[in-house]
Image (cartoon, rainbow, N blue to C red):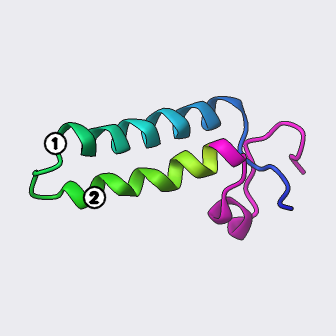
Amino acid sequence: MFSRNVGGIDRILRIVIGAALILGYFLNPDGAYSWAYWIGVIPLFTGLFGTCPLYRLFGFSTCPLNRS
């Protein structure tokens, strides 16, 4: 479907940050900006699938196999 453009460490950081933000919502659901924790879905999915639409838009890649 999409070619990979997110590599190793970048991918791990996205998954960890995304999961931490989502977990933050469950730890503090009544906070003033609790809706903002759901922004963690974006880095979580881009990390899991290995592709980032913004990287594609700007022609950037951290994946060593797809560097040009």
Query: Tag 1 or tag 2, which sits nearer the N-term?
Result: 1
Queried whether the magenta region covers residue 56, the answer comes back as yes
Q: Nearer the viewer, residue 23 or 58?
A: 23
State how many labels appear. 2
Find numbered disc 1 in the image and state the secondary structure of the residue it sits on: loop
Q: x, y percentage for residue 44?
A: 53, 46
In the rendering, which numbered label is found on residue 36? 2
Residue at image position (69%, 66%) is 58
Q: Is 12 on the left or on the right of 34, as rendered?
A: right
Queried whether the magenta region covers residue 15, the answer comes back as no
Q: Is 47 on the left or on the right of 66, as rendered?
A: left
Residue at image position (66%, 57%) is 52
Q: x, y percentage for residue 48?
A: 65, 42
Residue at image position (16%, 58%) is 33
Outermost residue toward the bottom in this view: 57
Quadrant in which the N terminus appears: bottom right
Q: Amino acid at mark 1?
A: Asn
Q: x, y percentage for residue 56?
A: 73, 64
Label 1: which residue?
A: 28
Find numbered disc 2 in the image and state the secondary structure of the residue it sits on: helix
**Looking at the image, do the residues carrying marks 2 and 1 touch, with CB atoms under 8 Å apart?**
no
How busy is the neighbourhood of tag 1: few (under 14 within 10 Å), some, or many (20 plus)?
A: few
What span is colored magenta in the figure?
48-68
State which mark lies toward you, 2 or 1: 1
- Magenta span main SS: loop
Residue at image position (59%, 31%) is 12
Q: Is 63 on the left or on the right of 55, as rendered?
A: right
Q: Amino acid at mark 2?
A: Ala
How busy is the neighbourhood of tag 2: few (under 14 within 10 Å), some, or many (20 plus)?
A: few
Residue 59 sits in quarter: bottom right
Q: Would you place residue 55 above or below residue 9 in this image?
A: below
